[in-house]
Amino acid sequence: MTDNRKGSLIRWLTEESNPSVRYFTLRDLLGRGEDDPLLQAARLSIPASKIVRKIFSSQKPGGYWENAINPYHPKYKSSYLSFTHIF
């Protein structure tokens, strides 16, 4: 990959519009440490991000998403799947 394309990819992965991707890019691809201010800011902005708010908006009052007894079903709507999208 050319340096120009690599730079474009890194800029895209570190956009502030998706703090989860930004956090993992800064930490895992760019090697930023936990004490790095940019990494800390990205981590702190994850809970308020659009995707996380959307996932939690469909959570039931009991703390689950679709099935209180089985967190793995129904497929694609379960509590388990919802958590995998967050983390």
Image (cartoon, rainbow, N blue to C red):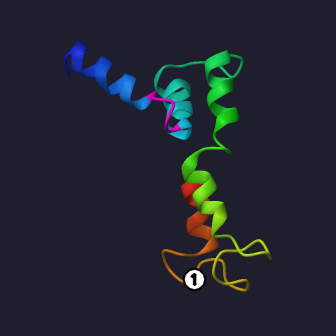
Rendered position, 85 above or below 66: above
Rendered position, 76 above or below 83: below
What residue lies at 62% left-to-right and 24% top-to-bottom?
39
Rendered position, 43 above or below 52: above
Q: Amino acid at mark 1?
A: His
Residue projecting furthest to the right: 62
What residue lies at 65% left-to-right and 75% top-to-bottom?
65
User: What x and y, as percent, mark residue 21?
Assistant: 49, 37
User: What x and y, as percent, mark residue 69?
Assistant: 73, 86
In terms of depth relative to the viewer, which is nearer, 15 or 5?
Answer: 15
Residue projecting furthest to the left: 2
What residue lies at 53% left-to-right and 34% top-to-bottom?
24
User: What x and y, as percent, mark residue 3?
Assistant: 24, 13
What residue lies at 67% left-to-right and 16% top-to-bottom?
37
| Category of crowding for the residue at label 1, using alpha-carbon neighbours closer than 10 angstroms: few (below 14), some (14–19), many (at least 20) | some
Rendered position, 85 above or below 64: above
Quadrant in the picture for residue 77: bottom right
Q: Main secondary structure of the magenta part?
A: loop
In terms of depth relative to the viewer, which is nearer, 51 or 30?
Answer: 51
Number of marks in the rendered image: 1
Quadrant in the picture for residue 9: top left
Quadrant in the picture for residue 62: bottom right
Instruction: Indicate yes or no whether the magenta region holds residue 28.
Output: no
Q: The N terminus appears in which quarter of the rendering? A: top left
- Helix, strand or loop at disc 1? loop
In terms of depth relative to the viewer, which is nearer, 3 or 54?
Answer: 54
In terms of depth relative to the viewer, which is nearer, 80 or 15?
Answer: 15
Residue stretch in magenta: 14-18
Instruction: Indicate yes or no whether the magenta region holds residue 16.
Output: yes
Report which residue position mark 1 lands on: 73
